[in-house]
Image (cartoon, rainbow, N blue to C red):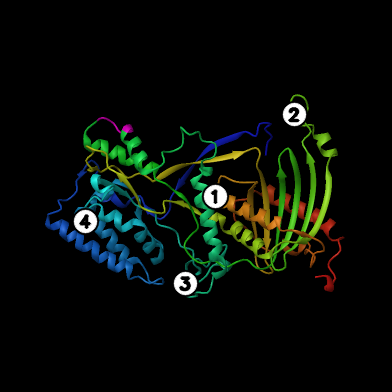
């Protein structure tokens, strides 16, 4: 990556489209039609309430292995009925990929969202209950082996029937989820955005700010503009797919790249997931700067110090780090729970049907010239090898950032000494098919191969532990 003496930050916009939502669902409604809410005392309202109760019964009765097609049809039929047509104010109609996904969505606020079209929930202090609009959660993706047998990580996916599979990684998933939430809470995913550019925080503040942005037209138009603003401000965060995952427990992980900025080390490491055996090759220096701030590359190169280390790292920490490195590309950005926004006074929740439009959000992508990229390759004992990339020393992507933090933890546990076994030669793995998990460039993969080969030539001369020393 290019150099910037001040450690400059660059903010870019990336368009992220949430999957499993149906942007064309409302196409049966004629654009321009005004949809109002049905009267609470009307027969159709009573029928709608009964239909919602039946749907609730059917969704809650689903087992983990049950197909969802019939219940999903019932849900979509309900949305097409008179009292639920105002739901056309959002394009995010759920298309769950499993019964687990549907039930999760329902319990996270899907039912509350539908119920709000029969009666707006009134929330707040008892003395000042205010009507609220419910913004539904997103459906989440499911990642089980039965429907993903061609998936790159299929060897680490569990079946729904095996309750013991994935037991080791359940705690890892909880730790990852806590990291994702804290990453969102402190706004690290927003990178270099200023406070003025960041969205409002809290439902009351968001509702008030969106109301101020709404036009001064008729009450119905103001509501729709306010609702669009709310949709754009809804809180989203990173999550892993639903499902159970195995831990990688064997093979070698090789990691190569520059760590550090002004003071840096070009580092190649190899760790064994079964024993924790560690091999480290470092070439370290510090940027020599001329008076004008340019880097004096000749002086920087002459100051390099070469270091070799062997030893062991904690196996469980290493496996968790590699697990997150493998699965971080499977993470998605979603709204996890339903959100409840106070309806501004004078705003009438009627909807004017518009031509369908894709639900796209602009997510900030920020990079710093103080960051670098590490390329890694996991080589299981058999089968394909896996190639990926990490932004070092941290990332504005929550899942990637967690993988980096776990790698730091594993490497911090290094106990220097003899290694329990030798690293296999790079040629052992070159004939295997490679699975590129994070769109790593051909150039970066080539550099990893070269760094691994150079480091291996140094490592093969190092002593290995005698049996009694292990």
Instruction: Decide: few, some or many residues near mark 2? Use Cα within 10 Å; few <14, some 14-19, many ≥20.
Output: few
119 lies above or below 313: above
Which residue is drawn at the image coordinates 48% and 59% (left, top)?
A: 241
Residue 197 visible (yes or no)? yes
**Horizontal and vertical percent position of residue 46:** 16, 59
Query: Looking at the image, is mark 1 or mark 3 earlier in the sequence?
Result: 3
Query: Looking at the image, is mark 2 or mark 4 earlier in the sequence?
Result: 4
Question: Looking at the figure, which quarter contains the N terminus?
Answer: top right
- Callouts 2 and 3 close, C-beta under 8 Å: no
The residue tagged 3 is 160
The residue tagged 1 is 398
Q: Secondary structure at mark 3?
A: loop
Return the residue found at the far top.
Answer: 292
Give the Cα separation between the discs numbered 4 and 1: 40 Å
Give the Cα separation between the discs numbered 3 and 4: 34 Å
**Horizontal and vertical percent position of residue 343:** 27, 42
Q: Secondary structure at mark 2?
A: loop
Question: Looking at the figure, which quarter contains the C terminus?
Answer: bottom right
Query: Tag on residue 294?
Result: 2
Question: Mark 2 or mark 4, which is nearer to you?
Answer: 2
Return the residue found at the far front.
Answer: 127
The rendered magenta stretch, by its main secondary structure, is classed as loop
**Horizontal and vertical percent position of residue 118:** 21, 54
Query: Tag on residue 81?
Result: 4
448 lies above or below 250: above
Instruction: Decide: few, some or many residues near mark 1? Use Cα within 10 Å; few <14, some 14-19, many ≥20.
Output: many
Q: Secondary structure at mark 1?
A: helix
């Amino acid at each position: 990556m290019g150099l910037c003496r001040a450690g400059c930050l660059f903010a870019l916009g990336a368009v992220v489209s949430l999957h499993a939502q149906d942007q064309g669902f409302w196409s049966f409604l004629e654009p321009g039609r005004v949809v109002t809410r049905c009267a609470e005392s009307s027969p159709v309202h009573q029928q709608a309430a009964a239909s919602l109760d039946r749907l609730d019964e059917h969704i809650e009765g689903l087992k983990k292995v049950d197909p969802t097609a019939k219940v999903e049809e019932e849900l979509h039929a309900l949305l097409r009925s008179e009292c639920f047509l105002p739901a056309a104010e959002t394009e995010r109609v759920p298309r769950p990929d499993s019964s687990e996904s549907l039930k999760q969505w329902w319990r996270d606020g899907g039912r509350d969202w539908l119920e709000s079209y029969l009666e707006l929930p009134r929330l707040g202090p008892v003395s000042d209950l205010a009507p609220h609009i419910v913004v539904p959660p997103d459906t989440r993706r499911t990642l089980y082996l039965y429907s993903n047998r061609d998936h790159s990580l299929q060897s680490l996916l569990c079946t729904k029937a095996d309750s013991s599979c994935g037991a080791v990684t359940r705690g890892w998933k909880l730790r990852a989820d806590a990291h994702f939430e804290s990453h969102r809470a402190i706004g690290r995913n927003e990178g270099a955005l200023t406070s003025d550019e960041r969205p409002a925080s809290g439902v009351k503040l968001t509702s008030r700010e969106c109301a101020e942005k709404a036009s001064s037209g008729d009450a119905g138009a103001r509501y729709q503009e306010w609702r669009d603003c709310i949709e754009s401000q809804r809180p989203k965060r990173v999550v892993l797919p639903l499902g159970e995952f195995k831990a990688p427990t064997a093979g070698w992980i090789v990691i190569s790249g520059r760590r550090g900025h002004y003071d840096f080390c070009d580092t190649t490491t190899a760790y064994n997931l079964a024993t924790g055996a560690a091999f480290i090759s470092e070439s370290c220096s510090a940027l020599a700067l001329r008076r004008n701030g340019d880097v004096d590359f000749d002086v920087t190169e002459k100051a390099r110090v070469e270091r070799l280390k062997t030893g062991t790292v904690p196996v469980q920490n290493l496996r968790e780090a590699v697990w997150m490195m493998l699965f971080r590309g499977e993470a998605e950005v979603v709204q996890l729970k339903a959100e409840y926004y106070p309806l501004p006074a004078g705003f009438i929740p009627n909807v004017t049907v518009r031509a369908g439009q894709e639900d796209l959000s602009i997510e900030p992508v920020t990079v710093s010239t103080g960051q670098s990229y590490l390329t890694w390759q996991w080589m299981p004992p058999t089968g394909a090898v896996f190639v990926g990339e990490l932004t070092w020393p941290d990332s504005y992507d929550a899942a990637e950032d967690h993988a980096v933090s776990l790698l730091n933890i594993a490497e911090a546990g290094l106990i220097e000494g003899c290694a329990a076994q030798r690293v296999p030669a790079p040629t052992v793995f070159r004939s295997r098919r490679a699975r590129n998990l994070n769109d790593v460039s051909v150039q970066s993969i080539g550099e990893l191969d070269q760094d691994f080969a150079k480091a291996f030539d140094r490592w093969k001369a190092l002593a290995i532990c005698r049996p009694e020393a292990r």
